[in-house]
Amino acid sequence: MTETPRTGGAELPSRRLTTVPRRAIAFLRTHGVRATLRKMRAHVDNAVFDRRYGVASDQWVAVTDLAVVGDNQDLGANCQPIKPLAFKAAMDAFQVPRDGVFVDFGSGAGRALMLAAQAGFHRLVGVEFATDVCDVAERNLDTFRAKAGVEFEYRILNLDATDYVVDDDDRVFFLYNPFDRPVLDAVLANIRRSYESSPRPIHLVYGRPLQRQALDDDPFWIAVDETDTGGLEDFVHYRPR
């Protein structure tokens, strides 16, 4: 069994199969039967993913409990895993090319990076400002690579997202509601500068896009597709105009 990781001196609570009924009842009251069934399937799939590959990525922790680098802790979102079903649905719908580097801003325990490797990306970068969570991600990715038999290279960078230097090989930028507007604006500016100095096909996939106005109002970006996975999460696919 994978040891429950610790960060900031506290255990990261793990979503276990036994918690699904309680959460399903609360969701049913506000969203109805169909959405609840999809939600239950997604939560079960979360737990099954971790058990199948021997990783510890299905955990939630408040951003205030994280030990981080940089000065933007108050602008970060809580650490929570993306649902495998939602990620797969979005990537299948958007048909994002698998060449180049997949960069996950706010990579947490590495769930999206593992799913990206499973989807066919071979070079991965995770940018995460929570120091101990980076250690968890590295263990997860090493374990996943051995158990899943998937070949990929990865780097986990313990950085504030605004300090990440966008590389010419970076082609797909992934965000799962990792931070608030000021940090997002700085990250988008860094991506744009890199693109202008080295034009190339790039894609940005934004999950749970609570700050999507930043991209919708930016003349540099255009939303080319979006998906709603039936009450799980929304995703938007952007490209330069």
Image (cartoon, rainbow, N blue to C red):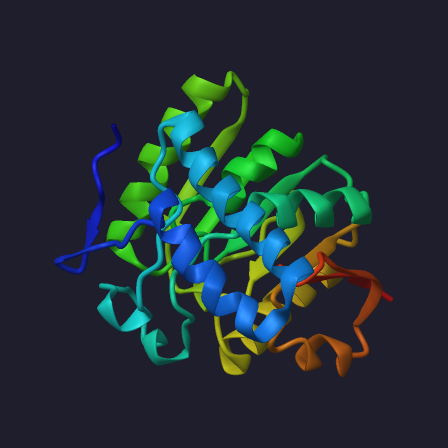
> In the rendered image, is residue 83 in sight?
no
Place residue 63 in its image quadrant: bottom left
235 and 41: which one is in front?
Answer: 41
Quarter occupied by the C terminus: bottom right
- Give above or below for 240 relative to 107: below
Pick whichever, 186 or 223, lies toward us: 223
Image spot of residue 67 (x, y percent): 22, 63
Task: Name above or below for residue 184 compared with residue 134.
Answer: below
The count of marks equals 0
Spot occupied by residue 131 in the image (x, y as percentages of width and height)? 27, 54
Q: Is residue 179 visible?
A: yes
For residue 215, what is the image quadrant? bottom right
Q: Which quarter of the figure has residue 130?
A: bottom left
Q: Quadrant of the N terminus?
A: top left
> On the picture, is 198 further left or further right than 108?
right
Q: Position of residue 111 (x, y in %)?
A: 47, 44
Identify which residue is drawn at 27% across, 73% down: 64
Q: Nearer the viewer, residue 153 or 194?
A: 153
Residue located farthest toward the left when viewing the structure as drawn: 9
66 up-or-down from 112: above or below: below
Q: Position of residue 79 (x, y in %)?
A: 38, 61
Residue 121, above or below 135: above
At x 81% / y 63%, what residue is drawn? Answer: 240
Measuring 58% from the left and 32% from the top, which residue is drawn there?
A: 117
Q: Nearer the viewer, residue 237 or 219?
A: 237
